[in-house]
Image (tube, helix red, strand yellow):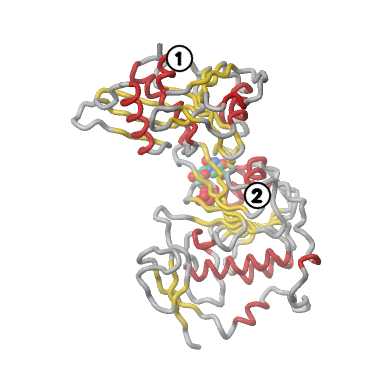
């Protein structure tokens, strides 16, 4: 049999018959790698590997005759996951769960499997049955209808699945899967793509939802889930710092819901715990009245999230003052410092500035500017800001405090969590409903107002 090889872009998976330096599809350089492929002769046989031969052939159908996707979704018994999926698991969907090794992907999905009262097929090419059993015991939930299968051959997996008839399939991980019709090694681009394609056809045909775990290496890695993002219906990213207990499940793509939802978990001794009220955990108690911290009323997805921003401003010992930010954009920090220097005449230029968002959370919501600025001034002037105060506002280049989205929701959450005062932008504030939010709403138009209001 003649061995055929081809070149694939390791970034986007585009195929090319010969090696090229720059990918014509995604524009990346030096991403093409050679892969041995062996399609052709066995293609037709392959298609039949798990299919029922009696099944009718596909013919074009009138859209009117197609029944809509069953609106009812499967409840995953995990509120965070349900929300991230857009209200539950859709039948026949393929969900890719990506993340760095060790972040907790296997734990998340095994936990999901054990919380169901449905029939689950958990396929693992990474761990032995005993290892999975140990993990299951650690997690503590029980589901007598959870089946473990440790094979890596896709055709074999789908055959077994046909016999078992599970309600949900979990594949751990796509990098270990292999299709016997392709010669290249598991984890290579052509294998990953072929196997995922096969799983996708299976899911669509049988209506069984499939979770696929995929590793991303630090460099983005070859055959990383990037290439799969086009094939699958939902892409979830599980992220977090290994050194913090918090894990965030983020939607990067969702054909059935919004993409800006997050789910928050904490990893503890018995698996992952859902955090339904993250704000309480992200704000440290206000016991010792230290300066340099301020609470931001932020929004992640549809969910309001109150977080603590911490700043340390101290005289620079070495020539060039240092700036460092964790969980916040460094360039944005420089911009905020420049605004404070210029508009309020505050001498940040001779100081080292460190900024940290508590809990190892990365924030992109511009509304935390106001809290960051407050924390910076608080540290510079060594004046403590009460933890009963929170902030929501974006700071513009001329020092103006700008309106942010979902103000009402932020105010409501602040009230619910027992804050006494929330500072927001004056701009268009008259549009806010005149009602009692249980928290005093104060308005600022410029950063200098902040100096008068809080640091007077
Ligand atoms: P794992 O799910 O194996 O990560 P991944 O599949 O993404 O590679 O989880 C890895 C870490 O989670 C591991 O370092 C141990 C930790 N862990 C706990 O802290 N508590 C637990 O109950 C479990 C099951 C794991
Ligand atoms: Mg794992």
Label 1 Cα crowd, 10 Å radius (few <14 / some 14-19 / many 20+): few
**Which residue is found at the position 69% from the left and 73% from the top?**
50
Q: Is residue 131 visible?
A: no
Q: Is residue 287 left or right of residue 146?
A: left
Q: Is mark 1 within 8 Å of ligand 1?
A: no
In the rendered image, the residue lying farthest to the left is: 319
- In this rendering, the answer to whether 294 lies above or below 323 is above
**Which residue is found at the position 57% from the left and 48% from the top?**
251
According to the picture, the residue beneath numbered tag 1 turns out to be 453
Q: Is residue 191 visible?
A: yes
Looking at this view, is 135 or 29 the one in front? 29
- In this rendering, the answer to whether 54 lies above or below 165 is below
The image quadrant where one finds the C terminus is top left
- In this rendering, the answer to whether 186 lies above or below 260 is below
Q: Is residue 238 left or right of residue 92?
A: left
According to the picture, the residue beneath numbered tag 2 turns out to be 257
* Mark sitting earlier along the chain (2/1): 2
Dot 2 falls on a residue whose secondary structure is: loop
Residue 142 is situated, as x and y percent measured from the top left of the image, at 70, 45
| Gap in angstroms between the C-alphas marked 2 and 1 | 42 Å
Looking at this view, is 44 or 385 the one in front? 385
Dot 1 falls on a residue whose secondary structure is: helix
Residue 117 is situated, as x and y percent measured from the top left of the image, at 75, 48
**Which residue is found at the position 66% from the left and 24% from the top?**
433
């Amino acid at each position: 049999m003649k061995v055929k090889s081809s070149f694939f872009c390791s970034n986007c998976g585009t195929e090319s018959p010969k090696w090229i330096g720059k990918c014509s599809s995604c524009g990346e350089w030096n991403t093409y790698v050679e892969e041995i492929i062996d399609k052709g002769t066995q293609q037709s046989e392959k298609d039949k590997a798990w299919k029922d031969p009696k099944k009718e052939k596909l013919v074009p159908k009138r859209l009117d005759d197609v029944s809509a996707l069953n609106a009812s979704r499967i409840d995953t018994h995990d509120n965070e996951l349900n929300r991230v999926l857009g209200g539950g698991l859709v039948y026949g969907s393929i969900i890719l769960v990506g993340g760095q090794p060790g972040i907790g992907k296997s734990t998340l999905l095994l936990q999901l499997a054990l919380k169901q009262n449905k029939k689950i097929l958990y396929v693992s090419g990474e761990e032995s049955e005993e290892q999975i059993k140990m993990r299951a015991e650690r997690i503590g939930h029980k589901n007598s209808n959870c089946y473990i299968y440790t094979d890596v051959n896709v055709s074999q997996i789908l055959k077994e699945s046909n016999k078992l008839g599970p309600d949900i399939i979990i594949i751990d991980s796509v990098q270990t899967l292999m299709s016997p019709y392709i010669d290249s090694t598991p984890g290579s681009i052509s294998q990953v793509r072929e196997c995922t394609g096969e799983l996708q056809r299976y899911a669509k045909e049988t209506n069984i939802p499939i979770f696929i775990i995929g590793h991303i290496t630090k460099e983005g890695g070859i055959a990383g889930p990037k290439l799969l993002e086009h094939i699958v219906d939902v892409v979830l990213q599980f992220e977090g710092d290994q050194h913090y207990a918090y894990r965030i499940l983020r939607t990067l793509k969702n054909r059935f819901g919004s993409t800006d939802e997050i789910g928050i978990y904490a990893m503890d001794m018995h698996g992952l715990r859902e955090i339904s009220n993250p704000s309480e955990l992200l704000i440290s108690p206000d016991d010792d009245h230290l300066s340099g911290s301020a609470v931001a009323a932020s929004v992640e997805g549809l969910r309001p999230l109150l977080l603590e921003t911490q700043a340390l401003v101290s005289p620079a010992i070495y020539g060039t003052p240092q700036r460092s930010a964790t969980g916040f954009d460094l360039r944005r920090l420089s911009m905020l410092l420049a605004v404070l220097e210029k508009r309020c005449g505050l001498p940040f230029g001779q100081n080292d500035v460190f900024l940290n968002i508590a809990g190892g959370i990365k924030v992109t919501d511009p509304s935390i500017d106001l809290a960051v600025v407050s924390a910076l001034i608080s540290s510079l002037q060594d004046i403590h800001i009460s933890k009963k105060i929170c902030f929501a506002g974006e700071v513009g280049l001329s020092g103006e405090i700008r309106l942010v989205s979902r103000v009402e929701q932020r105010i409501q959450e602040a009230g619910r969590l027992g804050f006494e005062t929330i500072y927001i932008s004056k701009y268009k504030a008259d549009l806010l409903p005149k009602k009692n939010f249980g928290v005093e709403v104060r308005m600022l138009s410029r950063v200098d107002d902040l100096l008068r209001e809080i640091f007077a």
